[in-house]
Image (spheres, helix red, strand yellow):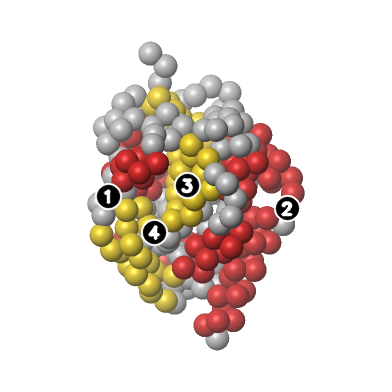
């Protein structure tokens, strides 16, 4: 059943992230407020490439990093010959090396290298049907290594299923703008990610619920105000993304 489950997981991801055209339009509109033609963007956890697709449509140069072999293969097949898109099969973390991935073949979007995060999801009703049924080992690189190789990005998108703090721990240079995922019952990971950003400078934050790709706050927030917003009834209904940019001087 392994190959069947993997095929089902792949098909489900393609349908969710590429099968609803309005989501691409919203994603492009949101990213257009951060980046423009020629800008360099890192997509950490590129999965099936819906963010790569939106960023490439805006004329950005995209480095898509994905640790799952099946999805790295898909990204290379889809974008491998597209100018301006580079696909790297690797995880991103605090230091270079190797890392085990807990893979959920039926729900591959939650494949993770964060063991503590995965164990905590056992008490999360949103993950009641998720089974991490397989393990693979992936190369692990850092954001600093990506910057050394490709240059300083205008934007970094991070979707690493609990590894967001570790991804940011491998960054020692101020990022102009970035995003990372939040889960309603895992706001400790948001706090840890903000602490990593505070090493680099003063940031302000915003957030987007689900796949709306719409910033929910009219103003950019302090870290404390962001956490308060993420504890609201609206934010607690579903996962979403946090957006961060340096505080204006």
Distance from the alpha carbon under mark 4 to that under mark 3: 12 Å
Distance from the alpha carbon under mark 1 to that under mark 3: 18 Å
* Residue marked by disc 4: 90
Disc 2, SS? loop
Q: Does residue 20 sit above or below 204 in this rendering?
A: below
N-term-proximal mark, 2 vs 1: 2
Instruction: Tell me residue 87's x, y (percent).
Output: 48, 54
**Residue at (59% x, 81% y) in the render:** 4
N-term-proximal mark, 2 vs 3: 2
* Residue marked by disc 3: 63
Distance from the alpha carbon under mark 2 to that under mark 1: 35 Å
Q: Nearer the viewer, residue 115 or 82?
A: 82
Specify the label residue 94 is tagged with. Answer: 1
N-term-proximal mark, 4 vs 3: 3
Mark 4 residue crowding within 10 angstroms, few (<14) / some (14–19) / many (20+): many
Q: Does residue 125 sit above or below 153 in this rendering?
A: below
Q: Quadrant of the N terminus?
A: bottom right
**96 on left or right of 156:** left
Q: Nearer the viewer, residue 174 or 245?
A: 174
Mark 2 residue crowding within 10 angstroms, few (<14) / some (14–19) / many (20+): few
Disc 3, SS? strand
Instruction: Tell me residue 127's x, y (percent).
Output: 50, 64
Residue 224 appears in the picture as rendered: no
Instruction: Tell me residue 239's x, y (percent).
Output: 53, 49
Q: Does residue 158 sit above or below 90 in this rendering?
A: above
* Residue marked by disc 2: 20
**Residue at (55% x, 72% y) in the render:** 106
């Amino acid at each position: 059943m392994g190959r069947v489950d993997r095929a089902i997981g792949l098909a489900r991801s393609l349908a969710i992230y590429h099968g609803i055209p309005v989501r691409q339009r919203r994603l492009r509109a949101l990213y257009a407020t951060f980046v423009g033609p020629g800008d360099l963007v890192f997509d950490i956890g590129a999965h099936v490439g819906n963010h790569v697709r939106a960023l490439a449509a805006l004329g950005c140069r995209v480095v898509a990093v994905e640790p799952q072999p099946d999805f790295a293969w898909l990204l290379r097949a889809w974008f491998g010959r597209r100018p301006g898109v580079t696909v790297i099969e690797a995880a991103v973390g605090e230091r270079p090396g190797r890392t085990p991935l807990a893979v959920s073949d039926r729900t591959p979007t939650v494949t993770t290298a964060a063991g503590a995060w995965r164990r905590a999801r056992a008490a999360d009703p949103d993950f009641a049907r998720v089974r991490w049924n397989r393990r693979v080992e992936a190369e692990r690189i850092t954001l600093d290594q990506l910057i050394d190789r490709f240059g300083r990005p205008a934007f970094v998108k991070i979707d690493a299923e609990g590894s967001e703090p570790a991804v940011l721990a491998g960054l020692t240079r101020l990022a102009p703008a970035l995003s990372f995922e939040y889960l309603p019952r895992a706001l400790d990971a948001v706090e840890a990610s903000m602490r990593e950003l505070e090493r680099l400078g003063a940031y302000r934050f915003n957030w987007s619920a689900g796949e709306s790709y719409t910033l929910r706050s009219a103003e950019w927030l302090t870290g404390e105000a962001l956490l308060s917003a993420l504890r609201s009834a609206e934010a607690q209904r579903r996962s979403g993304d946090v957006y961060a940019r340096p505080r204006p001087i």
